[in-house]
């Protein structure tokens, strides 16, 4: 799950309380390019019946596509990991500034002030989409991305993320398990997915996410079979 330190809606404390109320016994907080949520939590914030798993979701660039690599069971104080996350956050802020300049040229002002009111550490396009929706420039997230922020959007700005191998190495340096997140969302054919997983494994990657929201049962089975075939760990949510 994500918190308001990236693109979630809840504080870490509220998220853990909600998880406890729903009977969840293991929860990984994996904010985008940030471990601030874990640093903000005190022992008293963690329900007695819940195991909190440290995590992060790192944006990478592979074959001109944004691929997300999750790290779980990480040491949040590891220097190599935090150095990478700082660079990622700088890239996020730079992208937001670039988009803000493009918006101002189109007569849409106030993005910087809006972002300053948000608790997020890892600024994302989701936050900018919320800004556009609040200002009446988009009817919803889908239109905000298709018309304004996506690859063909008028205010699109590409981010120069780290490589898959850099993300995996940082996660491994922090003692964590590296996972390819939501593989069906990258629109990769079978050959390209296998090539991604081969490079990921070669870099030291460990696992593939095979169960997550809005995933068709047939695709879930295919991913699980692929996981077994490649002898990778399976991540589920």
Image: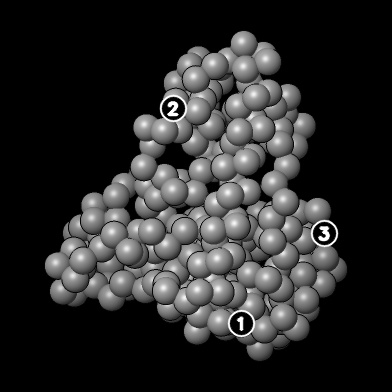
Distance from the alpha carbon under mark 3 to that under mark 2: 33 Å
- Asked whether disc 2 touches disc 1, contact meaning CB atoms under 8 Å apart, the reply is no
Residue farthest toward the right in the current orientation of the protein: 191
Distance from the alpha carbon under mark 1 to that under mark 3: 20 Å
Distance from the alpha carbon under mark 2 to that under mark 1: 39 Å
**Position of 161 relative to 81 (above/below):** above
Label 1: which residue? 206
The secondary element bearing badge 1 is classed as loop
Residue drawn at point x = 55 percent, y = 66 percent: 83
Q: Nearer the viewer, residue 95 or 17?
A: 95
- The x, y position of residue 208, in whole percent, is 61, 74
Q: Which mark is residue 63?
A: 3
Q: Quadrant of the C terminus?
A: bottom left
Residue drawn at point x = 69 percent, y = 27 percent: 155
**Earlier along the polypeptide chain: callout 1 or callout 3?**
3
Is residue 120 rendered to the left or right of residue 104?
A: left
Label 2: which residue? 114
Packing grade of label 3 (10 A; few <14, some 14-19, many >=20) is: few
**Position of 57 relative to 151 (above/below):** below
């Amino acid at each position: 799950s994500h918190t308001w330190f990236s693109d979630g809606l809840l504080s870490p404390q509220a998220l853990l309380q909600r998880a406890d109320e729903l009977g969840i016994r293991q929860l990984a907080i994996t904010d985008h390019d940030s471990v601030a949520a874990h640093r903000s939590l005190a022992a008293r914030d963690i329900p007695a019946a819940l195991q909190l798993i440290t995590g992060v979701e790192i944006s990478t660039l592979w074959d001109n596509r944004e691929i997300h690599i999750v790290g779980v069971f990480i040491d949040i104080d590891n220097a190599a990991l935090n150095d990478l996350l700082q660079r990622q956050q700088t890239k996020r802020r730079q992208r937001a500034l670039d988009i803000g300049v493009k918006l101002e040229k189109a007569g849409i002002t106030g993005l910087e002030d809006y972002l300053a009111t948000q608790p997020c550490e890892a600024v994302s396009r989701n936050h900018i989409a919320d800004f556009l929706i609040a200002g009446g420039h988009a009817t919803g997230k889908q239109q905000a991305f298709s018309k304004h922020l996506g690859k063909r959007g008028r205010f699109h700005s590409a981010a120069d993320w780290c490589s898959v191998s850099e993300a995996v190495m940082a996660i491994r340096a922090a003692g964590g398990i590296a996972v390819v997140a939501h593989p069906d969302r990258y629109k990769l054919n079978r050959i390209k997915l296998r090539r991604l997983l081969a490079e990921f494994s070669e870099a030291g990657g460990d696992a593939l996410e095979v169960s997550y929201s809005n995933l068709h049962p047939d695709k879930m089975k295919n991913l699980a079979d692929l996981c077994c075939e490649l002898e990778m760990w399976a991540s589920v949510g």
